[in-house]
Amino acid sequence: MTEARIEVTHKDGVADVRMVRVDKMNALDDAMFSALIETGEALKADPKVRAVVLSGEGRAFCAGLDMGNFAQMADGTRKSRGDTLVATPRTEGGANRAQHAVMVWREIPAPVIAAVHGVAFGGGFQLTLGADMRFVTPDARLAILEIKWGLVPDMAGMVLLRGLVRDDLARELTYTGRIFTGEEALSLGIATRVCADPRAEALALAAEIAGKNPHAIRGGKRLFALLQDADQHAILKAESVEQTALIGSPNQIEAVMSNMQKRAAVYTD
């Protein structure tokens, strides 16, 4: 299923992940959910991965939930199958399967950059939020589109929007489902960068990150994971724990020596 929906290439510590369901604008069907989870879990377990770029082939990043799912909701098929989202098995972090397809990208130890073009609607928009950063084209169209179908965002969107967008703006986007551009996404604080070629720029930044001490990068990502929920004391202590582990480690020494010797650093995974 992963091969049918996602392709991954590796180069110098950068994982280039591309959704390839081009005929359906990378819409989220069961196979795509499985592919996202399987790919994300594989990247989580690979110590050689130092940065990740997530993008969509064809006309769009991801058009959202496959239309077939809405048809099942309309005729009651989904309910008759007993698809209870509350009772479904959950990960250690509390995510059900659909939420895990997004949260797994946030759980990857290495930074993840989403490169967004075309559309990122509904579940596709929430998937962008799983990344550490979002590079978008100026004319990309994004939306928390679930209200169009009488639903609420339920793929970790609420968790990931928290702290990213002002509360009242998040509510407005959720209640209306209106479409906004990449340019507006930047002004809202959702997009990290607006660029003509998001994938090329994301790959360039990923390569830069991959050239840094990977243990320091991972430590930084662990610290950012604490910011929304931990109190000041926990964050301050975590800073000290991470720094203590880094000081005098082989990669930290290599960072110092390479700078002093004015040469490219060579880090171990």
Image (cartoon, rainbow, N blue to C red):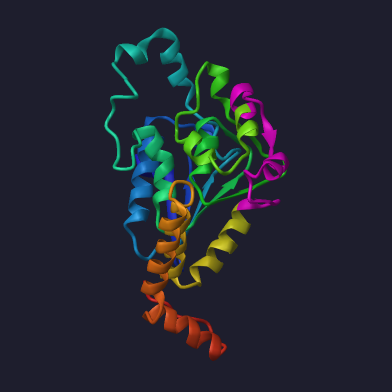
Please provide the residue range marked out in magenta: 172-198
**Compared to 65, does 76 lie above or below?**
above
Q: Is residue 204 visible?
A: yes
Residue furthest out toward the front: 233
Left or right: where 265 falls relative to 118: left
Snapshot quadrant of residue 2:
top left
Nearest the viewer among 39 and 105 is 105
Residue depicted at x 36% and y 16%: 78
Nearest the viewer among 235 and 100 is 235
**Compared to 257, does 207 lie above or below?**
above
Q: Is residue 15 visible?
A: no
Residue 212 in percent (x, y) is at 50, 72
Residue depicted at x 58% and y 43%: 164
Left or right: where 39 falls relative to 159: left
Residue depicted at x 43% and y 44%: 6
**Compared to 61, does 251 lie above or below?**
below
Nearest the viewer among 55 and 185 is 185
